[in-house]
Structure formats: C-alpha cells, structure tokens
Image: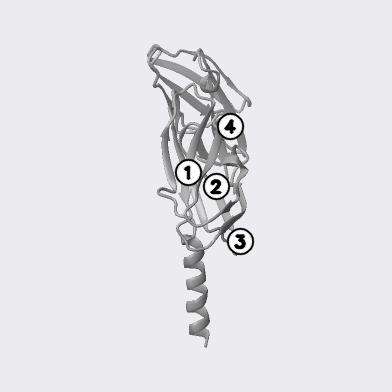
Amino acid sequence: MKLILLLWSALIAFVGAQSLDFPTKLKDLHAPAEAKTVSSDFEFTNKSGKTVNIRRYESTCSCMSVTVKEGKLRYAPGESGVIRANFDMGNFSGEVDKSVAVYLDNDPDDKPSVVLTTRVHIPVLVSAEPKTLKWEIGGKPETKSVRITMNHSKPIKVTQVTTSSEAFRRELKTITEGKEYELLLTPADINAPALCIVRIDTDCDIPKHKTQQVFGVIRKP
C-alpha cells in the first residue's frame, strides 16, 4: 500500500510539472557593464488536456520583480503566455543566478511546479583578489597582498585607499598605471582579534564599479 501511495504521489507531481511546457527554464544573459536592469522572458504553453491556473509566482530575491503577460493566470489547453523576470543589478558583478518560482493549483507551498532561472554575466571592471586576507592570533605579522586588476576598455586608476582600523598598515604599489596594482596589508599587532575594511576608490566612469572593498581579519586559530 505504501508503494502504491508513493507511486501515486510521484505521478501527481510529474503531471503537475508537465502541465505548463517551458521551452527553456534557464536564460543566459550577458549584460553591459553600465546596465542597471535586465529582463528575461520565459514563454510557455499549456500542453495538457485541462485548464491550468497559476496560483502564485514569486522571486527568490528582492532584486528581481516578476510579471505575467497581461496579468493572465488561467490557461486553457493550447494557450500560451509569458513570464517576465526583471533583475535590478545594483552592485552585482560576475556571474549571478536569480530564480522565479511558479506555483500551479495543486502545488504545495514549498514545492513549485516550475523554477525559472535568469543567469546574468556582469563584467567585473575592477577586480580585487583575494577579497579577504587572514592572520591567526599569535602567528607571524607577515605582509599579505591583494591584486587589483582593471578590465575596462580604457584605463582605471586607483585614486585612494583607506582602512577602517589602525591595526593594519597599508601600501599601494603600481604595477601598470591604469591597469594593475598591488595592495599590501600588514597587521601592526597580531595578539588580539581585529577586523579591517579596506576601501579602494577608483576613477571608473561607471558608478557601481567605482569602489571595491577587501577585508583584513585577525582571528583565533
């Protein structure tokens, strides 16, 4: 009996998942560095033999809003529609995945029939790696470095480097002006926990790429 119930549950889940057919559930987008928002449209068709209702749809992130074309939530067999995901890129950079959950009539609240993913590739114009430098209490107060690389069509210069704590000394070295720099960070005292936020300001002409942050951390072993 348990086996029958399990098979029946699996069949219901399968039918629900197939009631709206999406040619693709992943949209791969390459956004220009200056873009503030990007949108992806997910087309679908009701290929089942019954009317399908979209009960609910929601994004997994406040940075993404979701709309259904013409606000239509009820689809007869053979009808098609579009779900649009609008991603506010804010200060994101690199490869970012954001998803939309689509719930149909019989879906449990924690199991949507469909998950639609927008994958956005956002240029990293100012790269600072590694993002965090770490030291252990009682260890050696050795100097560690962050490589700052510019990936723009024109030069980007570092204009200022500031730290939030006097527990670290900083030094900026120019490798190639406008293209590559090295930030050196040295703890002044390594006998107590400490956190330092290092702010790197540049003259990048795109505001969201203008400033980067890295961190220095002294922690227990």
Q: CA distance from mark 2 to mark 4?
A: 48 Å
Place of residue 150 in the rendered image (x, y in percent of width and height, measured from the top left): 41, 20
Q: Residue at x 52, y 74 (%)?
A: 9
Q: 154 left or right of 118?
A: left
Q: How is the image coloured?
A: one colour
The one nearer the camera, 94 or 102, is 102
**CB-based contact (under 8 Å), mark 1 and mark 4:** no
Mark 3 residue type: Asp
- Tell me: 95 left or right of 103: left
The local secondary structure at tag 4 comes to: loop
Indicate the secondary structure of the residue bearing disc 2: strand
Residue 148 in sight: yes
Using the numbered discs, state the Cα–Cα distance from disc 1 to disc 3 in whole angstroms. 19 Å
Pointer 4 with pointer 3, Cβ within 8 A: no
Mark 2 Cα within 10 Å, few/some/many (few <14, many 20+)?
Answer: many
Using the image, determine if residue 161 lies above or below residue 190.
above
Asked which secondary structure carries label 3, the reply is loop
Q: CA distance from mark 1 to mark 2?
A: 10 Å
State whether residue 3 is above or below residue 172: below
Residue 42 got which mark?
1
Residue beneath label 2, please?
100
- Determine the residue positioned at 54% across, 25% down: 36
Check residue 105 in the rendering and tell me which mark sits there, or answer none: 3
Q: Amino acid at mark 1?
A: Phe
Where residue 189 is drawn, which disc sits there?
A: 4
Check disc 4 and give the amino acid type: Asp
Of labels 4 and 3, earlier in sequence is 3
Picture residue at 47% right of the left edge, 66% below the top: 14
- Of residues 131 and 63, the one nearer the viewer is 63
Whichever of callouts 2 and 3 sits on the residue coming sooner in the sequence is: 2
